[in-house]
Image (tube, rainbow, N blue to C red):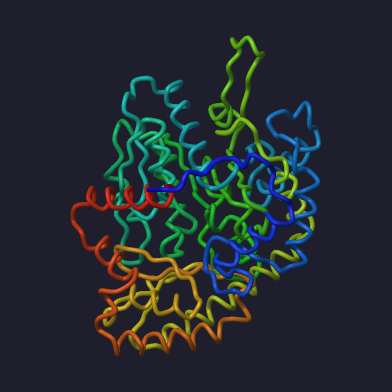
Amino acid sequence: MHKKTSIPSKGIPKEQLLSKMESLRSMDADWRSGKTWSLVYYAGEEHTGFLKKAHNMFFSENGLSPIAFPSLKTFENDVIAMTACMLGGDKNASGTMTSGGTESIMMTMKAYRQWARANRPSVKEPEILLPVTAHPAFEKAAHYFDLKTVHAPVGNDYKADVNAVRELITENTIVMVGSAPAYPHGVIDPIPELAAIAKERSLGFHVDSCLGGFMLPWLEKLGYPVTPFDFSVPGVTSISADIHKYGYAAKGASVVLYRSKELRRHQFFVYSDWPGGIYASPSMTGTRAGGSIAAAWAALNSIGEEGYMRLAESAMKTAKAIMEGISGIKELYILGKPDMSVFAFASDILDIFALGDAMDRRGWHLDRQQFPSSLHMMVTAAHEKVAGPFISDLNESVKEVLANPKSSSEGTAAMYGMAASLPDRNAVNGFVLDFMDDIFK
């Protein structure tokens, strides 16, 4: 039986609460030391301290009302304009800020649904055509907005199969999707070819660059080969890009961009018959955290192009060094040919999930993936100092797993292995729902 928790009858002293919070935080992933390879994008304590000041300056302000808080309107408009410029937009490009990549993706899918209702009313069951590697936020959007997802396969290079995509278009398709890059393997889909098909068929084409939007432009300037993916590509009609990833802003800050204001209008929600007044909202949320908007503006302006190029070059060199180190371990290999500092590695010899557990015991946090089973890494400039120790520990962990065949049936390896192998995905979903029930008990 769970202990009942209620609001304390009398307030607890603030210092006591802060001490307890610090104690609880000690159990969290150690991202400051560079041992976490996702979730946090760290550009050093000085930058983090600056973001906190910018965020706290607008801690209580609410982006719901640009009339009450014109400062936030200025910050948001500037962030949208700077991002659009970075991603090849012209004077017609427009957008809004959101709380993160999932909301950005959901808002674009809602916009395309409304566009279809206005321009293609014969479509009763609108479809999103996307690669199997596209982010689950598209599935979430389909779930919430009564859309259908149609999945296109990827080739051996983990990029969307262009011919398969072409064959999967139906009279119900309203938007196509490509990733730059796709999260699982860090590869960019063939955006120019896919966008050309969308343009030919008068379909929307969304580029999910939540992960790469604030990294790929700088890599291109540094001379790295980057598949064209932004508004410079004919047929691309919208892009999502997270500032709180490689833009090194405070969470949650993302941008959704449209090639035209006409398309963006379908994202907005307006209700003018409420006794409380006219209600208008640009995105999913009502109240919008002013601190995140202000901190995003502060991040872009304080880092600047020169700073972003320096951070991008550091992250890319570190990622390449780590990938070379992994490839030097005969039991492991990199999946595909990653286009930036995001990649996954697998093994045909040992249980990759058991290897993840062994690395956990050494203090490293690596995300697990399936189809195929692999370990995932997102490298930032903050990982430069830990590349060598990581490869050293990875070598030792490989030896440990090879020496202990039973490790596949222990720890999280058993859970991930079962989830990846079960053909009944409904059973897996049920298992995950039970797990979530337990976490949020």
Identified at 36% across, 90% down, the residue is 399
Which image quadrant for residue 384? bottom right
Which image quadrant for residue 224? bottom right
Q: Residue furthest front?
A: 9
Identified at 38% across, 50% down, the residue is 436
**Residue 256: x %, y % from top left:** 58, 42
Vertical relation: 306 (above or below) 439: below
**Residue 328: x %, y % from top left:** 42, 88
Q: Is residue 301 left or right of residue 118?
A: right
Identified at 42% across, 38% down, the residue is 141
**Residue 356: x %, y % from top left:** 39, 74
Looking at the picture, tell me which residue is in the foreground, 205 or 150. Answer: 150
Q: Residue furthest left?
A: 423
Looking at the picture, tell me which residue is in the foreground, 71 or 33. Answer: 33
Looking at the picture, tell me which residue is in the foreground, 204 or 77. Answer: 77
Count of numbered marks:
0
Q: Is residue 75 left or right of residue 109?
A: right
Q: Is residue 77 left or right of residue 105?
A: right
Which image quadrant for residue 104? top right
Q: Is residue 234 left or right of residue 250?
A: left
Looking at the picture, tell me which residue is in the foreground, 343 or 427. Answer: 427
**Residue 338: x %, y % from top left:** 46, 69
